[in-house]
Structure formats: C-alpha cells, structure tokens
Image: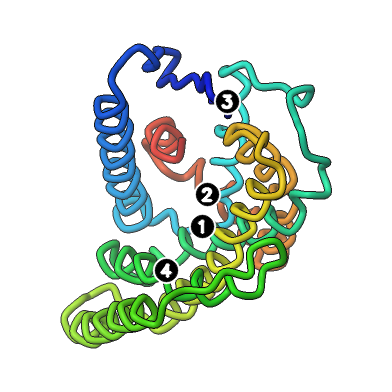
Amino acid sequence: MTKGEDQVRSLFGISLSDRPRWQQFLICSSGFFFGYLVNGVCEEYVYNRLQFSYGWYFTFVQGFVYLVLISLQGFTTKQMVNPWKTYVKLSAVLAGSHGLTKGSLAFLNYPAQIMFKSTKVLPVMVMGAFIPGLRRKYPFHEYISALLLVVGLILFTLADANTSPNFSIIGVIMISGALIMDAFLGNLQEAIFTMNPDTTQMEMLFCSTVVGMPFLLLPMILTGELFRAWSSCYQVRNFPFLLILMF
C-alpha cells in the first residue's frame, strides 16, 4: 500500500482499488477479524493443548514468517524512506510486547488475555502526551471512558481468577508488561508516520521485525527457552502441524 492521492489497496495480490470504499472497508475489516480469530484459536491450542508455552521463541519464529511474506509481496530495502535507526526503539517495544503477550497464554486463558489487551487504550492515551512529535491531549471525558474500561477489566479479572483453571498472577504481570510496551508501541508508530508521511505500512512491519528479532535472542538465552523450545519441537508428534499453527 502506498500513500498519496492515488492510493493502491490490494489484498493477497488482488487489487481492491476499483471497488467502492465501503466494500474495501468491509473486506479489509472482515479479513482482520477473521484472521485475528483464527490466530487466537491457534495460539491457545498450541499453548494449552500441545503445551508449547514458549512465548519468546514463538515470536521469533513468527518474525521469520513475516519477513518471508513481506518479501513475497515485493518489498525491498530500496523502498525505505526512513533510516534504520528510526526503528530501534520501536522494534524493542514491539518484540517485548509480542513476546510477553504470547508467553502470558501459558498462565492465562485466552479470554482473559484479550480483555487485558483491550484496555491498552488508557496507557496509549497517557503515553501519547509525552512522545516527541505527538504531545497529544484528550478531552476529560475520554479519560473517564478509558478508566471505566479498566474498572470493568478488574471486575472481570477477579471473577475469572475464581472460576478459571488456567489463571495465574504471573500471567497478569506478563500481560501488564505487554500493555506498558503497547503504550510506547502505538505512539512510536504514529510518530514515525507523522514525521514522515511517505512511510508505508510494509516498511514499518519489515524494518521493525528485522531490527526487533535480535532483541528476542537475549531473553530466549537467559531463560533457556531457546534450547527447551527447540527440543520440545522434536518431542511433539505432530511437529509439522505445530509449525503451521505457529506460522
């Protein structure tokens, strides 16, 4: 996708530009929700049924898949409009957010994880007031709305902690850390787009993934997850199916 008046929109190589805008929105939004649903089902299956609870390794493998898919779309580094250093901070928080989010599924059920992630609007709003290039301010009623959302999450969490067989305070700490990362992530992405409107989403995803993957090596090595995950892959009978789910 490119920016500008003659914006070209395509999905899986199929051009959507000749369709009405409402159809483009409907197709893209439906694809997003369907993909998110399938992703969630697969992740919970891998963590809870196959007992493959290695969030950092999971994120690392997915990073390789992202790069392959982006390359198949025809993106190259010659199309970059930002220097590599622009993506260092963004990549660090992106890797941390994805790793902690996926790792939390080993201690939380999927509905609880989604409820936590849905409250990231509040930390994103707060952090937006401090990110250079944004310095965003919101009306008072929007902060109240976000706060009520968090209160609802707290009530849901208290109930879920008493009824769910897969609920741990460790998972709460991990997903809370992911929310803090998300507070920086969303605002840093918007700051890059604001400071350089020619930045494409393809460049953003490609560069943040390339720069972010080395950040994942440190927690994998320190926790020993890299070697345990690799060994666990060969102990799973349906190893090829596991790889498909991770992709």
Residue 22 picture location, percent across and down:
25, 29
Residue 4 picture location, percent across and down:
57, 27
Residue 64 picture location, percent across and down:
61, 35
Q: Earlier in the sequence, mark 3 or mark 4?
A: 3
| Numbered-mark total | 4
Residue 146 picture location, percent across and down:
35, 77
Q: Is residue 195 left or right of residue 244?
A: right
Q: Which residue is mark 1?
A: 54
Mark 3 touching mark 4, by CB under 8 A? no
Mark 2 touching mark 1, by CB under 8 A? yes
Q: Nearer the viewer, residue 43 or 240?
A: 43
Under circle 2, the secondary element is helix
Rounded to the nearest angstrom, the CA distance separating label 3 from label 4 is 27 Å
Q: Is residue 44 left or right of residue 132?
A: left
Q: Which residue is mark 3?
A: 2
Q: Which residue is mark 4?
A: 121
